[in-house]
Image: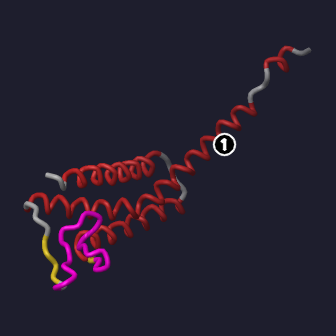
Amino acid sequence: MIGLLVIVPVAFFAGWILKKSTTLYCGRAWPSGWLGLFWLSAALGLGLGVWFCCYAEWEAMQFRRLPIPIARLDPVTGVWNELEMSVALRQLVLAVDFVAGLALAMFPITASMRLAEFMDESRRLRAAAASQTSPSAVDAP
């Protein structure tokens, strides 16, 4: 059960990043450069997710799989010892590791798209404020 205290927040954070990415992508017509970066980061994220849940071994940190480990390396014997968890929890850990890898690669493009959207909105509001005539200019003969 203690593993769920780590798994659930990581899963929600990674899911939130992916939800924001999808919302930003679908929310407006982006130039092709942004779309290319979005799909490149998605492909990188898929690769990173597969590596996280299938192949990641950090002997220096003595963990197998990331960000939530499923095995620990015994430095004396050099043998990987599986952490005690149920099969369902192990599958959940591997799924969260995959989603975390995908979200890790998607985070930079999501932040960049959000910043670009904010800058466009700021420019639009500034242009709307500049185009409005002041009430004193209308009243003057």
- Amino acid marked by disc 1: Arg
Rendered residue at 40%/48% (across/down): 20
The answer to whether 126 is drawn above or below residue 58 in the figure is above
The answer to whether 61 is drawn above or below residue 39 in the figure is below
Image location (x, y in percent) of residue 30: 52, 53
Q: Nearer the viewer, residue 31 or 9?
A: 9
Question: With 35 as the anchor, is 95 left or right in this view?
Answer: left
Question: With 59 as the anchor, is 87 left or right in this view?
Answer: left
Image location (x, y in percent) of residue 119: 61, 47
Rendered residue at 51%/53% (across/down): 113
Q: Is residue 89 magenta?
A: no
Q: Which residue is the site of mark 1?
A: 123
Image location (x, y in percent) of residue 54: 22, 73
Name of the residue lying farthest toward the front = 76
Quadrant of the image containing the C terminus: top right
Question: With 15 as the anchor, is 94 left or right in this view?
Answer: left
The secondary structure type at the circle numbered 1 is helix
Image location (x, y in percent) of residue 95: 21, 61
Q: Nearer the viewer, residue 138 or 101?
A: 101
Q: Is residue 73 magenta?
A: yes
Rendered residue at 78%/25% (across/down): 133
The answer to whether 59 is drawn above or below residue 22 in the figure is below
Span of residues in magenta:
58-77
